[in-house]
Amino acid sequence: MGYQDQIDLSRVPKHIAVIMDGNGRWAKGFGKLRIFGHHNGVKSVREAVEAADDIGVKYITLYTFSAENWNRPKFEVSAIMELLVTALSREVAQMMKNNVKLSAIGDLDQLPPRCLKELDNAKEKTKDNTGITMTLAISYGSRREMTVAAKNIAQQVKDGKLNPEDITEEVFAQNLYTHDLPDPELLIRTSGEYRVSNYLLWQIAYAELYFTPKLWPDFRREDLFEAVLDYQKRERRFGKTSEQV
Ligand code: IPE
Ligand code: IPE
Ligand code: MG
């Protein structure tokens, strides 16, 4: 029996977040440039999104490029931006076929205009799709996201639109890039690194963390199913005792 058949479809996470890591090491294993790994990671994205959709996951949010990744060598940064442009334009047809709705979070103003244009185009084309929502976190950093939220809230208070007593967790969450996404129940990180690298720090407060040594370009449908199965074996207690849940 494959992993997929063992999944309890009534207890599938609604939202899965993924840190797609290990492209550079994967390429190095073939004696190739890092960008070769990024190119081969696109197929893994397709597989992960389709697999998630197949079991009824509603949202998948992929760490595509971090705020810190701008500090990589210029050559790699521009190659990744170029890849984003080509992959987005190439994958739109497949997204339409699979009813995938594209979204993006992050400091998108930092993106090269061509990249932003392709992103807007894909978002516009897929906006009425009703299947899984695939959100790309690009130029994304969680601390920045929270700092921006704090600024927005401060401005609302200053403008007399909000009382400090009314700043609740919900209000804070409403001011994050992810305001229209539920919190992820499962966070997957590939490549054997055990850290969260400034990703969705507020949103993963109670997420189950799943780490796999697989490098991202090797990630396939079965790996997504295996992560969901592992998630289903865990007891989510939210501070209560085992007897209470
Ligand atoms: C993840 O793979 C992709 C991005 C961060 C853009 P890496 O490029 O970080 O690959 P490793 O971690 O160096 O192997
Ligand atoms: C995290 O991977 C960012 C993405 C996957 C886009 P990194 O490879 O940049 O993370 P660190 O620097 O090793 O923590
Ligand atoms: Mg990495």
Image (cartoon, helix red, strand yellow):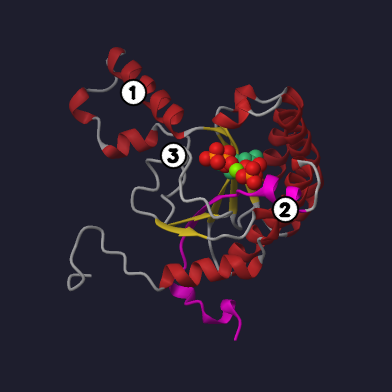
User: How many other residues sit within 10 Å of disc 2, few (<14), some (14-19) or many (≥20)?
Assistant: many
Q: Give the left or right position of residue 75, taking residue 57 as reference.
A: right
Find the residue positioned furthest to the bottom.
1
Determine the residue positioned at 45% across, 30% down: 145
Q: Secondary structure at mark 2?
A: helix
Kindly identify which residue carries mark 1: 153
Q: Tags 3 and 2 in contact by the CB under 8 Å rule?
A: no
- Sooner in the amino-acid sequence: mark 2 or mark 1: 2
Residue type of the residue flagged with mark 3:
His
Q: Is residue 223 visible?
A: yes
Residue type of the residue flagged with mark 2:
Met
Give how far across and how far down residue 143 sits, in percent. 42, 30
Foreground pick, 155 / 75: 75
Identify whether 122 is placed above or below 30: above
Give how far across and how far down residue 215 sits, in percent. 64, 56
Residue type of the residue flagged with mark 1:
Ile
Determine the residue positioned at 44% across, 74% down: 10
Question: Which quarter of the image is occupied by the C terminus?
Answer: bottom left
User: How many other residues sit within 10 Å of disc 1, few (<14), some (14-19) or many (≥20)?
Assistant: many
Q: CA distance from mark 3 to mark 1?
A: 14 Å
Give how far across and how far down residue 82 sits, in percent. 78, 33
Say the numbered circle drawn on residue 140: none
- Sooner in the amino-acid sequence: mark 3 or mark 2: 2
Q: Is residue 13 magenta?
A: yes
Give how far across and how far down residue 201 sits, in percent. 40, 41
Q: CA distance from mark 2 to mark 1?
A: 35 Å
Say the numbered circle drawn on residue 179: 3
Q: Secondary structure at mark 3?
A: loop
Foreground pick, 115 / 33: 33
Instruction: Write the start and end of the magenta stretch as one range.
Output: 1-29
Kindly identify which residue carries mark 2: 95
